[in-house]
Image (cartoon, coloured by chain):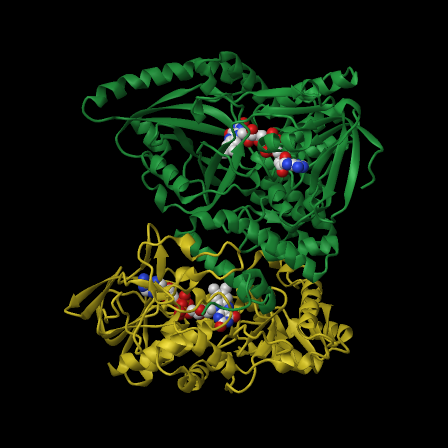
């Protein structure tokens, strides 16, 4: 890629905040570059619950945060309507035993009053008002609910596909002139007079090429990596309370609502429908390890199952396809437990630390990324002396315009509506561009991934237009290999398509395939059991028994040439 | 589309109702279970098979791994070790393998394979000479695989003798499950890597679009194969013409694995039309070879007078150390001897819910001779996806006649014999001894059951 001599702003980190800031800066006419060391959304932005929520929890002590969250959540809904889906929540109220019964009866109106207060804010994001359900109604709506409930209260939130949200922001940034470098790691800062940060030293992780990128302002949006990076490159102290969180991912929707449960330590957890499956989360534990190495553990899995079992007794019979783990970049506070920590954010100017030209952000949520980006871009503009107003809440994200109905596109392209519907969900008003590839080549009508489903055409579109540099990157764009088979049926073919698009040699494409298999394995191996173990046995047969990999390579992949004797 | 073509394979099973009786009951109707049933039948026992559905065998790729051993890897092909020396490698280094634990594999394997070839004539299994090296077969997964032999019509695709010639992979331009240009590139690179300096070439040939209006990629190979059967007079000459125009200098044509439901006839006809050997590629699931195997097993069982019930064994009645009857969902089967052939994880023979267990008798499970007990899955997994996952070697431990043992090496049921992938000691996923071990152990189990 041809780079500029100097940029107005360089942004480090391709999470939701980095891509959001890049979009905002580019829209204000700044010469912008974004550098991400892996793929977009490979940090916290790719491991969260995908909730664009209004912050009902803050209502107790900080109603203003709730109001702002709701307003901003409403904006995200307006700029990317295709990526948002309604997530109705249900708080079941158990009957209790003995004296507890009376307490539980009193709890119901109290819970209801709380939600009634939230309705006022929730309307700002087009949320439905709460409802109170009798036990009978709750069981009708959620047949898997544990017996003995005396009723339930519902409220309404929004969910999103966080990967697509990052990609959409990056595409928009690019369309406004920004350069986006993925799989490029920032290895150091360039320092001028008086400690001024004048840009970055980066290394392309695929080619090994190193370069220097000059920028008048450098903004560090590396989420949980922030303390390490700032210490190492800037000699600046930024404190976070990084909080590890895991989710169990299910092969199907399991529940109709996000159902709330309480863990053994009183924390709230949930199981909720997400995309074509369901997710169960989440934990929140102080994490001092390397964010690159975060991985779920069986203890965490057990903790979550134990909690949800209280409200969905059949939960252990459902099929966990994988465990995803991430680290929250939570603001630092001492002496509070993890749940009580503030979820807000702070933009930091390191001029005061002797590093003028260097900014960073601490904290932040997916749901408030747009607002955070606006604050960040305001500060960047101020430092550059640029006066341009933010428009990210007014201008739609790519695909955010009205999309044609699935039935219409289905007829036009002779594809089933359920396939077209998913293309529209991921690409919104640009769905037609994706489907147009089916006219170029009939193979593009075939499904690579039957779980989601994903056509060959959509995969090719992503590879060509959505910053894909490695095979594993297609996963976040299309959800290929993310469904119930976890790549058993699609990875080999996806690898062939990638190889064809990129003109890779067979040896190179095998490395890509193994890379994607390995990436899936990391999440699958934590909770392998039940029917997923059957799928894995078949997966192993397909990818390691059938000649996709030859014996020598298999031995190398296994790390040894000798069987254990 | 004729209805008859869609009904491939025809249903031969019946429903269990009340109590059925026999000499030998086989639990599981995959390759191992069917071999056991047929070999017991050969010894004149009356036999019943119960099985709820087809399992791993129906995903079979088309090649039979007897001892494909990856040590030393069979490269270059001209110096590949013989099947026999691979077998001896297994016998020496894998004391948990059924070849070692049950009977005398070195002596009996040829007889077992011969038996399978005889009972499943549709598949055209060749006679096996353990002194020869393994065949080399290309698959739709890309690359090659070494196996003792393959079913017809993949058998003709053996690449051992073709490392200095040119082969063509044919595909339909709108059926990406067999993307000829990609597969050809992968195969050429893989064969050349394995045989440095060889002049192997793989090129792609385009058969055009699948001749039906329907998108072939939205159909199963089985459906497409049945369509082909119905239209072959029309289609084959057209394809032959295309192949003749594109593959003049090729010594072998490799075709997509959907060449008719029966297997050999279509390729033979194409072969006579083109004047070149024609073979199917081995297949990933959904696999036409798996369908043909299933059909061959069921028709063999039927013609030998074995009763097949569609049911699931779920429990048992006992007297002392003997199983009196096996309880299924819809009834009971009383049998003198019981053969357990219900497969590994893919078929539900072994399961893991809160712990690992064998699904009918709750037999103790073992990995490399060690009891599994309450151990967790991650203890048997490698951090590398392609690593050595001992979990897939888990299974039932037996004495030399195949009777399941407990942790103290005592026979648990005097009239129970286990065979196939539910056995401890090998992984059916690695392409080393999958179908071969199923045939061998099934054949043995049937004979022991008939005698016992
Ligand atoms: C379990 C869990 C559940 C959550 N649930 C929600 C929720 O429901 N709703 C919500 O609003 N928020 C939620 N969050 C919080 C939210 O996900 C994060 O706050 C948000 O994604 C942070 O985005 P970010 O862009 O700041 O950081 P990240 O997404 O972590 O991005 C940082 C990026 O920087 C890159 N990087 C690191 N080092 C370098 C380098 N040297 N060079 C270049 N790039 C580098 C990383 O690869 C990474 O992609 C949750 C978080 C977790 C962990
Ligand atoms: C994708 C794939 C590709 C393969 N490719 C090759 C190859 O190229 N070469 C090779 O040599 N091997 C290959 N194999 C391995 C080989 O096909 C199998 O190991 C072999 O077919 C297993 O046979 P089986 O009879 O032991 O088990 P299965 O075929 O799994 O049969 C188990 C049977 O038991 C039944 N059953 C389960 N539970 C019960 C119950 N409770 N009661 C009654 N019945 C029950 C099932 O319905 C089924 O009929 C492959 C396997 C797979 C999965």
Ligand 1 quadrant assignment: top right
User: In the rendered view of the protein, which quadrant contains the C terminus of chain B?
Assistant: bottom left
Please identify which colour was used for chain A in the image. green
Chain letter, colour yellow: B
Q: Is residue A50 above or below residue A470?
A: above
Q: Quadrant of residue A345?
A: top right
Query: In x, y percent, where is residue A214?
Result: 80, 31
In the depicted structure, whether residue A412 falls above or below residue B444: above
The x and y percentages for residue B100 are: 39, 77
Which residue is pictured at 52% across the width and 60% down the height? B387
Residue A374 visible within the image = yes
| Depth check, front residue: A110 or B365 | B365
In percent of width and height, residue B201 lies at: 73, 73
Locate residue A209, reporting x and y percent: 77, 46
Residue A38 to residue B219: above or below? above
Left or right position of A221 against A54 = right
């Amino acid at each position: 890629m041809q780079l500029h001599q100097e940029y107005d702003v360089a942004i480090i980190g391709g999470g939701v905040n980095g891509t959001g800031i890049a979009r905002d800066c580019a829209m204000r006419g700044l010469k912008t570059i974004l550098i991400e060391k892996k793929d977009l959304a490979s940090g916290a932005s790719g491991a969260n619950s995908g909730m664009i929520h209004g912050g009902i929890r803050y209502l107790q002590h900080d109603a203003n945060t709730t109001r702002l969250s709701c307003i901003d959540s409403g904006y995200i809904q307006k700029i990317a309507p295709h990526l948002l889906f309604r997530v109705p929540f249900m708080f079941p109220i158990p009957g209790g035993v003995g004296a507890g019964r009376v307490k539980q009866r009193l709890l119901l109106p109290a819970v209801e009053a709380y939600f009634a207060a939230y309705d006022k804010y929730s309307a700002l994001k087009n949320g439905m008002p709460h409802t109170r359900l009798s036990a009978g109604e709750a069981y009708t709506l959620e047949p898997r609910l544990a017996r003995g409930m005396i009723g339930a209260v519902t409220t309404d939130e929004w969910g999103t596909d966080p990967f697509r949200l990052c990609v959409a922001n990056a595409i928009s940034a690019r369309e406004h002139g920004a350069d986006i470098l993925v799989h490029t790691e920032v290895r150091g800062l360039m320092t001028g007079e008086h400690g001024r940060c004048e840009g970055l030293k980066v290394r392309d992780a695929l080619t090994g090429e190193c370069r220097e990128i000059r920028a008048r302002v450098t903004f560090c949006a590396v989420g949980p990596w922030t303390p390490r990076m700032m210490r190492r490159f800037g000699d600046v102290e930024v404190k976070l309370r990084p909080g590890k969180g895991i989710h169990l991912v299910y092969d199907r929707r399991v529940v109709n609502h996000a159902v709330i449960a309480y863990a053994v330590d009183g924390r709230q957890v949930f199981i909720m429908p997400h995309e074509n499956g369901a997710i169960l989360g989440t934990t929140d534990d102080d994490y001092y390890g390397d964010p690159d190495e975060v991985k779920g553990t069986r203890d965490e899995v057990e903790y979550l199952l134990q909690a949800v079992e209280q409200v969905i007794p059949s939960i252990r019979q459902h099929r966990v396809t994988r465990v995803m783990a991430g680290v929250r970049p939570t603001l630092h506070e001492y002496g509070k437990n993890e749940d009580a920590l503030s979820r807000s954010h702070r933009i930091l100017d390191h001029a005061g630390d002797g590093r003028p030209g260097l900014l960073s952000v601490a904290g932040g949520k997916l749901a408030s990324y747009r607002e955070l980006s606006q604050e960040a871009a305001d500060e960047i503009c101020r430092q550059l002396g640029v006066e341009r107003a933010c428009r990210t809440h007014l201008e739609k994200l790519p695909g955010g315009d009205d999309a044609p109905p699935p039935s219409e596109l289905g007829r036009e392209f002779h594809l089933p509506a359920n396939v077209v519907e998913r293309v529209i969900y991921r690409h919104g008003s640009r769905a037609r561009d994706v489907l147009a590839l089916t006219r170029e080549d009939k193979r593009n009508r075939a499904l690579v991934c039957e779980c989601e489903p994903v056509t060959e055409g959509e995969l090719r579109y992503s590879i060509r237009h959505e910053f894909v540099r490695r095979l594993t990157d297609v996963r976040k764009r299309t959800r290929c290999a993310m469904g119930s088979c976890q790549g058993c049926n699609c990875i080999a073919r996806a690898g062939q398509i990638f190889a064809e698009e990129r003109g890779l040699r067979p040896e190179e494409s095998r490395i890509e395939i193994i890379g994607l298999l390995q990436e899936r394995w990391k999440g699958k191996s934590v909770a392998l059991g039940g029917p997923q173990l059957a799928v894995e046995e078949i997966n192993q047969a397909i990818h390691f028994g059938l000649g996709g990999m030859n014996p020598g390579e298999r031995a190398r992949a296994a790390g040894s040439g000798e069987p254990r004797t | 589309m004729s209805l008859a073509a869609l009904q491939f394979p025809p249903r031969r099973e019946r429903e269990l109702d009340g109590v059925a009786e026999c000499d030998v009951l086989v639990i599981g109707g995959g390759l191992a279970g069917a071999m056991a049933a047929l070999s017991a039948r050969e010894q004149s026992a009356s036999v019943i098979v119960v099985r709820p559905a087809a399992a791993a065998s129906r995903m079979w790729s088309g090649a039979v791994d007897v001892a494909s051993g990856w040590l030393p890897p069979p490269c270059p092909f001209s110096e590949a070790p013989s099947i026999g020396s691979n077998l001896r490698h297994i016998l020496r280094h894998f004391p948990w393998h059924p070849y070692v634990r049950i009977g005398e594999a070195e002596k009996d394997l040829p007889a077992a394979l011969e038996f399978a070839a005889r009972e499943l004539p549709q598949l055209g299994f060749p006679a096996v000479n353990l002194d020869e090296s393994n065949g080399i077969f290309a698959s739709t997964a890309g690359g090659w695989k070494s196996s003792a032999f393959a079913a017809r019509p993949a058998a003709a695709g053996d690449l051992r003798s073709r490392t200095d010639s040119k082969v063509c992979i044919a595909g339909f331009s709108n059926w990406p499950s067999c993307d000829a240009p990609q597969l050809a590139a992968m195969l050429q690179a893989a064969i050349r890597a394995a045989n440095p300096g060889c002049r192997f070439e793989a090129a792609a040939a385009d058969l055009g679009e699948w001749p039906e209006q329907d998108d072939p990629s939205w159909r199963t190979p089985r459906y497409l194969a049945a369509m082909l059967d119905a239209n072959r007079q029309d289609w084959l000459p057209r394809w032959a013409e295309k192949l003749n125009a594109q593959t003049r200098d090729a010594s072998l044509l490799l075709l997509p694995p959907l060449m008719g439901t029966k297997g050999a006839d279509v390729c033979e006809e194409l072969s006579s039309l083109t004047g070149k050997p024609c073979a199917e590629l081995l297949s990933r699931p959904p696999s036409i070879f798996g369908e043909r195997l299933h059909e061959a097993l069921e028709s063999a069982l039927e013609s030998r007078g074995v009763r097949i019930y569609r049911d699931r064994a779920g429990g048992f009645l006992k007297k002392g150390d003997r199983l009196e009857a096996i309880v299924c969902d819809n009834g009971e089967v009383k049998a003198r001897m019981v053969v357990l052939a219900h497969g590994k994880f893919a078929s539900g023979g072994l399961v893991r819910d809160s712990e690992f267990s064998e699904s009918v008798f709750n037999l103790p499970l073992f990995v490399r001779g060690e009891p599994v007990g309450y151990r967790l899955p991650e203890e048997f997994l490698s951090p590398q996806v392609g690593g050595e996952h001992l979990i897939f070697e888990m299974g039932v431990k037996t004495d030399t006649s195949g009777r399941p043992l407990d942790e103290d090496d005592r026979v648990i049921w005097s009239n129970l014999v286990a065979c196939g992938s539910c056995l401890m000691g090998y992984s059916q996923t690695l392409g080393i001894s999958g179908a071969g071990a199923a045939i061998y152990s099934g054949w043995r189990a049937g004979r022991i059951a008939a005698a016992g």
